[in-house]
Image (cartoon, rainbow, N blue to C red):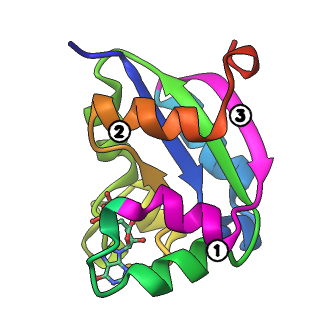
Amino acid sequence: MSTNRTFTMIKPDAVANGHIGSIINDITNAGFKIIALKYTKLTDETAGQFYAVHAERPFYKDLVSFMSSGPIVAAILEKDNAIEDFRKLIGATNPAEAAEGTIRQKYAKSIDANAVHGSDSDENAEIEGNFFFKADERF
Ligand code: IDP
């Protein structure tokens, strides 16, 4: 059953390039409600844990070092059909292939520094949200 929730991160490239406000604006304008929000920074260790599912992929090391290279914004978002609608809003993994008007098309420059994360399933949204937020940090 759908939880109507997803988890996102504004990645270090988008934070460094000054896009936090614009991205949150796009997210709320698309009808997502913010349930939890945090400005934080991953370490090599916590980024490695978060992306453990990709440990066998060739880009894993680069991904972990990129995701711990600077601050990020983490958030839990709520909306009907949240997982699918949010993935539509952010666009394809490779910004060169992302549809016009999507967050990655507007704010990302490369497949590794692609501005935002979006959960790919209800199960992962739950796991990823729990990685960053305790019960008393959700509203
Ligand atoms: P997604 O973020 O669109 O769900 P995934 O395939 O789950 O894409 O990959 C997770 C993250 O790993 C991507 O957002 C991107 O930052 C990075 N990544 C994926 N494929 C590549 C690649 O071929 N080279 C470098 N980084 C990649």
- Under 8 Å from ligand 1: the CB of mark 3? no
- Asked if residue 50 is among those painted magenta in the image, a careful observer would answer yes
Q: Please tell me in which quarter of the rendered image ligand 1 is found.
A: bottom left
**Residue 138, located in which quarter of the rendered image?**
top right
Q: Position of residue 89 (x, y in %)?
A: 37, 44
Above or below, 130 against 57 in this view is above
Q: Secondary structure at mark 3?
A: strand
Identify the magenta region.
31-52
Q: Amino acid at mark 2?
A: Asn
Q: Which mark is residue 37?
A: 3
Task: Residue at 57% x, 51% y: name it.
Answer: 9
| Quarter residue 60 falls in | bottom left
The answer to whether one can see residue 32 in this image is no
Looking at the image, the residue that sits furthest to the left is: 1
- Which one is nearer the viewer's eye here, 26 or 4? 4
The percent position of residue 93, horizontal first and vertical second, equals 31, 66
State how far apart marks 3 and 1 are (Cα). Answer: 21 Å
Q: Nearer the viewer, mark 3 or mark 1?
A: 1
Residue at x 72%, y 64% (from the top left corner): 15
Foreground label between 1 and 2: 1
Q: Which residue is mark 2?
A: 124
Amino acid type, label 1: Asp
Residue drawn at (36%, 85%) of the image: 59
Number of the front mark, 3 or 2: 2
**Marks 1 and 2, the one that precedes in the sequence:** 1
> Is 101 above or below relative to 66?
above
**Which class describes the residues within 10 Å of circle 3: few (<14), some (14-19), or many (20+)?**
some
Q: Which residue is mark 1?
A: 44
